[in-house]
Amino acid sequence: MTQTLKKTDVVIVGVGATGGVAALPLAEAGLKVVGLEAGPWRHIEEFPMDEVRNDVRNYLGPKASAELPTTREKSSQVAEPTLTPSVATMNGVGGSVIHYSGQSWRLRPWNFKMASETIKRYGHSYLPKGSLVADWPFGYEDLEPYYDKVEYLLGVSGQAGNVNGKIDPAGDVLEAPRSRPYPLPPLRAGGYTELGHKAAHRLGWHPFPGPAAIHSEDYEGKSQTHCQYCGFCTSNGCMTNAKASVNLNAIPQARKTGNFEVRADARVTEVTVDGEGRASGVKYVQGGKAYLQPADMVILSSYLYENIRLLLLSRSKAYPRGLSNNHGQVGKGYISHGYLIVTGTFPERLNQFGPTAQQTTLSDWDADYFDHTGLGFIGGAMLGTSTEKKPIAGVEGALPPEEPLWGSKWKAAIKTGFLRSGGVLGQVDVLPYESNYLDLDPTHKDPTGMPVIRLTYSIGKQEQLRAAFLEEKCLEWLKEMGATRTWAFPTFPAVNVHAYGGARMGTDPDTSVLDGYSLSHEVPNLAVLGGAGFLNTGGRNPTETFQAMAWRTGEHIAADWHSITA
Amino acid sequence: MDWERFMADPRRTRSRGRTAAASTTPDSGDGRPDGATRDGYSEAIRRGYSRRQVIRFGIAAAVVPTVLLEACGGGGSSTTTATAGAKARQMSLDQILGLDDKPVTFDAGELRTVEAVLERLIPSDGEGPGAKEAKVWRYIDHALAGAYAELRPLYTANLAALDKFSSSGGGKSFADQSPQRQEAILGEVQAGKAKGFTPSAEAFFLTVRQHSLEGMFGDPYHGGNAEFVGWNLIGFPGILDVNPAAYQKLGVKVPQAERSVAQFEGMFELDVDSEHVRGGKAMGMSAGEIFGTAVEGKGA
């Protein structure tokens, strides 16, 4: 028996990084917003610094772990379930930014114009056959004001390199102009980040401290204390609330208006439509009871896999292949970040106990900051020094692959190697391809009986060339830092916390699902936030871009409320 | 200092058995019930500690964990002396965490085989303690009775398969083989050459190896890494709620804090009425002061 609730203006599915931020301009504009979150309210006491519980067992994400997509490389294969629970998406009011590393980046102007800039500089041959590379429907300059709002909402710590054209060599000299400096100074340097900084300088590169949504100093009373460098950020909430997760800023701020009601432990199962094919609300289950929440506007802001799954599961007379999928575009253009982990052995203790986001980074080998002529690929990666060394993962990463995995020799090697192995990490651009897509798995279901998402995913020649090129740069950097023995792990996971595509933005409904404000072409009162709309990955963490876009979408919906919901 | 303000923050006072501190808490009306935390941490703390306590790093007697004194019959004094610190340490970590050596799920035969496998994976040798001292078996035993219960049948089947493989052709069971022979057998299991395993010998090997790392280097709260032997072996200092800049310098030998997350009182339940906080002594200390000796200088 489904209980129909009182209609609200906006219903937000997933109260996390994007839903939490989008709620703010909507609630502040006076719209009544209901946020449905599949996970519970989360509390600081649930964030113990425990690698087994957090990293190994993904304690915070049982729902996400139970519905991980299946994967295969080609459509001719049968997809296999993803067994590891270590894909770090979680459930709870605040979402996965509760337990992310807190790296808070802006994409680069080039990322938004990847197709046209590539053609202009290198010709059509640099856009590989079968790729779906396209310009975004908006540019960096459109998003800049929202990046700025997000950075000041969260309290991002960082060193600006370009404020309104004024270059500061202490920051990222390659970054596009920003309207203001970061609200907080960067996280402090550690011995290892200094080592990386000096070495990059000697190589003629442009190192700077990476931006972090972690308070280096107290910020408007939003954290209980600033970062204490405990080194247990990732896969865990912050034990002092120094990490600027949206449950500490956007969500309480939106709730303060009295217009934002959050319902936790409420799992949405379907988006409903009216006779004219407009979204009319959502069905959800909470405490074993089924509800229908009617709304004038529906915003999907769960993790990408869940957003796409909800679209595909929401079949109706108007949308027999799934919501907003009458053009067959839902699921297309799936992309997943590549990672390049290059590690070296050092003569002394590196003591990299601290936050992942406490890092020396550089943009020299990202986007189009270097000439790709003759290289056979476009794009690149932001490179950064790795920290947050935890014992289990640190032991696993301490030795080159040719070393034994167990026994006395192994033990002797990790005994010294744990503290003396250090790495640099690249977040590698991956292009969208026609052959990579998401759909519903025909056999595998989650514990509630709903089919999970199936990924069909493989990388192209460009990815291999890009990773090989970047690997050389990482090795060069590590050797300059003093590493002796080095080894590299390029990895292109299919299931990923940095996932993109599936509801691509664009101007043409035949080739895209969403418009430039993340609103559906087919269902004008439906928005899909997060990575699903992305047309390429960019070479750095996506969350701040998700959040800037969410704010822009929320503001747009509030401003054009009557035409969007008419 | 900020840390002092944090610890003294009235928002951190306990409310009906739950920290009311976090601004993650809905202010009202969202129907989130009060109740127990969602895992056993608070339970562990109740088992190990009294409520009136402020636990700081249990090293160098910088601050005496009052509760340990209480638990050891020390009378709940809040004095901070090296003698008291030594007394406090008379309570073993197992006692603090409420752990004992009775297997929960393994039977005697399985335990013998598992211990023999773990001894080969992480031997006790001249380099230092191994799986045995860390009680890795206990980590796996507890995990299979809890978080990894779905893997219990895999262990049941494959421990039997290992013995069968070991004794095939008239040989001994795995635990009765010589260390050299055990290594050779495990090598065949790792390489997938051993027969009779589910779903495969390699898969089982990798599972046990992964679990052995978790048991050796995971938090002692989960039953392994007993007395922090795993962390001390590799130089992981333990759980630090304040990690001073001095500890991140290159070449520095960071003191072993020997601290489990379950001993980290600050975030779970803080009693702001405690004398330590009222007096501002413990919480007002700099990180270096908390650690007493601070940084020990350059290490090898």
Image (tube, grey):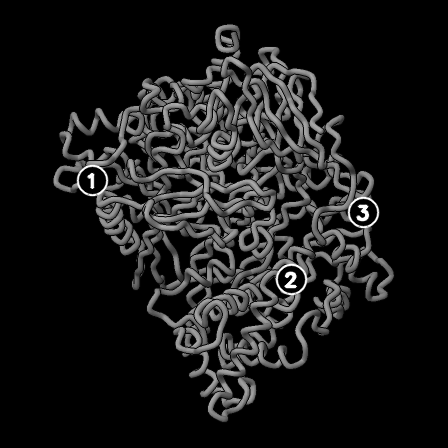
Q: Secondary structure at mark 3?
A: loop
Q: Are marks 2 and 1 in contact (CB under 8 Å)?
A: no
Identified by mark 1, the residue type is: Phe
Observer-nearest of A559 and A218: A559
Mark 2 and mark 1 on one chain: no
Q: How many marks?
A: 3
Chain letter of disc 1 in the image: A
Residue B288 in percent (x, y) is at: 59, 52
Identified by mark 2, the residue type is: His
Q: Are marks 3 and 1 in contact (CB under 8 Å)?
A: no
Q: Secondary structure at mark 1?
A: loop
Mark with earlier residue (3, 2): 2
Residue sitting at x 69%, y 21%? A4
Q: CA distance from mark 3 to mark 2?
A: 28 Å
Q: Quadrant of residue A457?
A: top left
Give left or right: position of A464 versus B78.
left
Q: CA distance from mark 2 to mark 1?
A: 47 Å
Mark 3, residue position: B274
Q: Is residue B227 visible?
A: no
Q: Quadrant of the N terminus of chain A?
A: top right
Q: Are marks 3 and 2 in contact (CB under 8 Å)?
A: no
| Residue furthest bottom as drawn | B170
Residue sitting at x 50%, y 9%? A559
Observer-nearest of A114 and A153: A114
Observer-nearest of A172 and B251: A172
Mark 1, residue position: A377
Chain letter of disc 3 in the image: B
Mark 2, residue position: B222
